[in-house]
Image (tube, coloured by chain):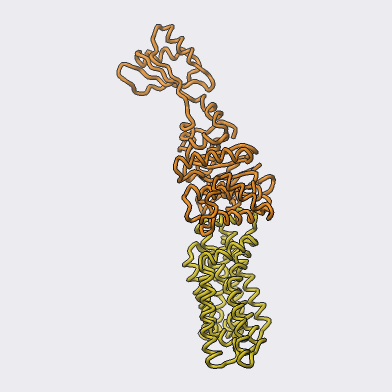
């Protein structure tokens, strides 16, 4: 389990991470989502002990990353944005070195390296120099390094950046496979990727955590604020008159539409479904509705809303 | 630490730097040995070794320049610093690997007195002491090079600054004679040294109150001493800075067959100080 409490990181006057707190529970795949420059990499670098925080603390299984670094770092495998590879070594030499560095026992080292190489499918290139490998393979060697020693938590910083679509799918499958036995935290600025792989999303914007929930819950939570769209052939004034008789409506706007058709966007009190009431109100007046459509907020909308300037705060379990 | 040491040692041979370093030192020493000992028939190998001293100025920066700067540039330091290994052990592993590379030519040098022996009388004690002190001096140079390499991301800057520092140390004795010996000059010199130290303290701590406090207090003390007893400052720079003549310890052995234990302690202290500074530099970078 990883606890991040009140983390602040300042580079001079620039605040990269701003009072960030969250907990990572065992056995999930967490997705750290945010636009470029949101502070994802910095957060990960602090969590793994590469950078020191200006304020706040990171505890890994109860061990503070700065005070008991050796104990804490043992429980974490890390693949940074740029895989930390010594390009003048062969894949096998490099992984043997990484295993020794991670204090894998001498008698287990060979077996474990072989096992990891098979897991990430680089066994065929084990005797090649890392500098001669393609980007996809380099990424996998980096991943193998993170998995070595089979730490409890594996942290991956943008693991699919710069890969071709086929490689992306392969890496995703690998992450899912790893998640069977490890807690995985990955960062990305691509929403589709996080939704596909992760079962818990944390959205970071300007160094702050703006949302943290499962993808389904996130969509559900935001559902309350979704607008209902109707179209009729009545004049706007008449439409307003009818709508005023429906209880629970908080706001109605009339965006432009085709000539002769009135479009209304209706916002109701959160959690209240006013669709039936609106239908009945129009039926009582013997007026026809052309369309009635509940706009559904996708994760994309939530993401954009949360990460843009002046976006509304997320009400979920922060 | 052992893992880093082994990897680092091997990498000097992957990249040829290690091989070239060893070959370079061995060839130049061989030439001096041939000229001084074989051709001119001088029985002390230590004399050739003192001729080779300047070669270290070029060879050591080549050896040390990539030690820390390259890791930082390629971001491989992320692997080392996120592994369950302390920074001190990382620095120690890398330093010992470089020292081992330098040890190889020094072991080759050990054969030369034996060759002299086959031609007549050899002075084993003097020669082997000279080789040992030469080795220690190289270790100090390597520690300085490591520190400068940890300060930058660029190998070139690391190499050139190391060369510059080693050059100044090489010329130290000569430079000393240009220092002012009167009281006011002495005080100014001390003040400059103190200010440099304070700037370093500020660079490391970023504490403006602390550093300006030290600076102000120090300046006042210096002025008071000047007015009370200005003769203290006469020739003080030469006296203080002369102690830092790094090469003197070695040249005393090679030219006069004098081994100064104080000098050995001085070398070991310098190694310790520069390795400590290297560790601090890396630690500090994580917090800025």
* A274 sits left or right of B219 in the view: left
- Give the x, y percent position of residue B27: 51, 79
- Give the x, y percent position of residue B131: 62, 81
How many numbered marks are there? 0
Q: Nearer the viewer, residue B123 or A157?
A: B123
Which residue corresponds to the image point at 61% horizontal and 37% vertical from the top-left? A28
Residue B239 vs A247, above or below: the answer is: below
**Furthest residue in direction left, as rendered:** A259
- Determine if residue B262 is in view: yes
* B283 sits left or right of A294 in the view: right
Residue B261 vs A27, above or below: the answer is: below
Which residue corresponds to the image point at 39% horizontal and 10% vertical from the top-left? A288
Q: Nearer the viewer, residue B206 or B11?
A: B11
Which residue corresponds to the image point at 62% horizontal and 47% vertical from the top-left? A115
Chain letter corresponding to the colour orange: A
Residue B238 lies in what quarter of the image? bottom right
* B144 sits left or right of A74 in the view: left
**Furthest residue in direction front, as rendered:** A124
Q: Nearer the viewer, residue B122 or A303?
A: B122
Quarter of the image for the C terminus of chain A: give it.
top right
Residue A234 lies in what quarter of the image? top left
- Give the x, y percent position of residue B244: 59, 79
- Rendered hue of chain B is yellow
Q: Nearer the viewer, residue B77 or B3?
A: B3
Quarter of the image for the N terminus of chain A: give it.
top right
- Determine if residue B287 is in view: no
């Amino acid at each position: 389990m990883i606890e991040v409490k009140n983390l602040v990181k300042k580079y001079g006057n620039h605040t990269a991470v701003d009072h960030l707190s969250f907990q990572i529970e065992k056995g999930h795949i967490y997705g750290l989502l945010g636009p470029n420059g949101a502070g994802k990499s910095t957060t990960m670098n602090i969590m793994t002990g590469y950078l020191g925080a200006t304020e706040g603390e990171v505890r890994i299984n109860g061990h503070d990353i700065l005070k008991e670094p050796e104990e804490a770092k043992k429980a974490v495998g890390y693949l940074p944005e740029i895989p930390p590879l010594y390009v003048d070594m062969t894949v096998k030499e490099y992984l043997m070195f990484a295993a020794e560095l991670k204090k894998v026992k001498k008698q287990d080292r060979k077996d474990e390296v072989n096992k990891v190489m098979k897991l990430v499918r680089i066994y065929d290139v084990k005797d090649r120099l890392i500098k001669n490998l393609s980007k996809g393979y380099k990424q996998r060697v980096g991943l193998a390094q993170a998995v070595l020693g089979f730490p409890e938590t594996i942290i991956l910083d943008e693991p699919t950046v710069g890969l071709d679509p086929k490689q992306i799918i392969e890496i995703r499958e690998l992450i899912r496979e790893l998640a069977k036995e490890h807690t995985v935290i990955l960062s990305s600025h691509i929403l589709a990727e996080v939704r596909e792989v992760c079962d818990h999303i944390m959205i970071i914007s300007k160094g702050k955590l703006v949302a943290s929930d499962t993808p389904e819950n996130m969509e559900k939570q935001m559902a309350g604020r979704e607008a209902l769209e109707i179209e009729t052939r009545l004049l706007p004034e008449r439409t307003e008159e009818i709508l005023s008789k429906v209880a629970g409506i908080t706001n109605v706007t009339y965006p432009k539409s085709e000539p002769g058709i009135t479009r209304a966007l209706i916002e109701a009190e959160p959690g209240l479904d006013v669709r039936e009431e609106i239908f009945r109100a129009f039926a009582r007046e013997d007026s026809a509705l052309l369309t009635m459509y509940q706009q559904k907020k996708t994760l994309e909308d939530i993401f954009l809303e949360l990460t843009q300037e002046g976006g509304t705060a997320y009400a979920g379990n922060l | 630490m052992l893992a880093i040491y082994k990897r680092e040692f091997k990498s000097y041979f992957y990249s040829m730097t290690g091989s070239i370093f060893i070959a370079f030192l061995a060839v130049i020493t061989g030439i001096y040995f041939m000229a001084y000992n074989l051709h001119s028939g001088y029985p002390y190998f230590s004399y050739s070794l003192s001729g080779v001293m300047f070669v270290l100025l070029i060879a050591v920066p080549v050896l040390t320049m990539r030690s820390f700067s390259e890791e930082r540039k390629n971001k491989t330091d992320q692997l080392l610093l996120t592994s369950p290994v302390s920074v001190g052990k990382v620095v120690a592993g890398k330093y010992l690997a470089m020292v081992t590379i330098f040890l190889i030519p020094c072991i080759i040098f050990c054969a030369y007195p034996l060759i002299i022996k086959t031609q007549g009388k050899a002075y084993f004690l003097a020669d082997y002491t000279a080789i040992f002190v030469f080795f220690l001096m190289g270790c100090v140079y390597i520690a300085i090079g490591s520190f400068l390499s940890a300060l930058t991301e660029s190998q070139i800057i690391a190499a050139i600054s190391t060369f510059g520092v080693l050059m100044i140390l090489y010329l130290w004795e000569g430079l000393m004679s240009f220092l002012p010996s009167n009281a006011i000059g002495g005080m100014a010199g001390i003040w400059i040294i103190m200010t440099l130290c304070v700037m370093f303290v500020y660079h490391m701590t970023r504490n403006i109150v602390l550093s300006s406090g030290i600076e102000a207090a120090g300046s006042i003390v210096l002025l008071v001493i000047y007015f009370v007893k200005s003769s203290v400052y006469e020739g003080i720079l030469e006296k203080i800075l002369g102690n830092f003549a790094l090469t003197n310890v070695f040249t005393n052995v090679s030219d006069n067959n004098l081994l100064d234990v104080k000098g050995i302690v001085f070398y070991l202290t310098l190694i310790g100080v520069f390795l400590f500074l290297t560790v601090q530099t890396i630690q500090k970078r994580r917090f800025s």
